[in-house]
Image (cartoon, grey):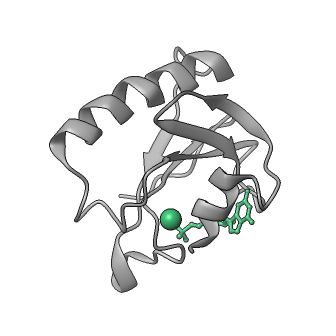
Amino acid sequence: MCLFCKIIKGEIPNKTVLEDEQFLAFEDINPQAKIHVLIIPKIHVDSFNEISSELMKDITSFIQKVAATLGVKEKGYRLITNIGQDGGQEVKHIHFHLLAGEQLGALV
Ligand code: 5GP
Ligand code: ZN
């Protein structure tokens, strides 16, 4: 079982920000910004390459709720999903990084 599936099962503790039947948002263990939250589906999907458009639709609404819960919707935030080896994906369970709470440096 992958690391994030173990977190979903409660075998590894996490600091939950928001949860519903389909998704979990929790604090990253090694934050890269003042706010760094990971958002994952509770069903295992390897990466963005495999996610269905239906699940993508639902996770979009959930991510918007996470941003509202964190109070960062107005000031802004960054969403990142790393895909595969060249994308720097270390955990093979799709996750969106939500970075916020400060002025983030330009990436592109
Ligand atoms: P990736 O590099 O795959 O896009 O991101 C994986 C993220 O998972 C990293 O930002 C890393 O800090 C985070 N991470 C790895 N192990 C754990 C853990 O056990 N708990 C939490 N909360 N985050 C983790
Ligand atoms: Zn998994």
Locate residue 57 relative to residue 100 in the image: left or right. left
Locate residue 48 relative to residue 54 in the image: left or right. right
Name which residue lies at 78% across and 59% down: 29
Name which residue lies at 67% across and 54% down: 9
Judge whether residue 89 can be spotted in this image.
yes
Image coordinates of residue 1 in percent, x first then y, are 57, 74
Residue 33 position (above or below residue 108): above
Q: Quadrant of residue 101?
A: top right
Residue 23 position (above or below residue 69): below
Image coordinates of residue 66 in percent, x first then y, are 56, 26
Name which residue lies at 35% across and 58% down: 108
Considering depth in this image, is 98 or 43 the residue closer to the camera? Answer: 43
Locate residue 98 relative to residue 63 in the image: left or right. right
Locate residue 21 relative to residue 61 in the image: left or right. right
Considering depth in this image, is 79 or 17 the residue closer to the camera? Answer: 17
Outermost residue to the left: 53
Image coordinates of residue 36 in percent, x first then y, are 67, 46
Residue 83 position (above or below residue 11): below
Image coordinates of residue 43 in percent, x first then y, are 43, 52
Number of numbered callouts drawn? 0
Q: Quadrant of residue 85?
A: bottom left
Q: Quadrant of residue 2?
A: bottom right
Judge whether residue 75 can be spotted in this image.
no
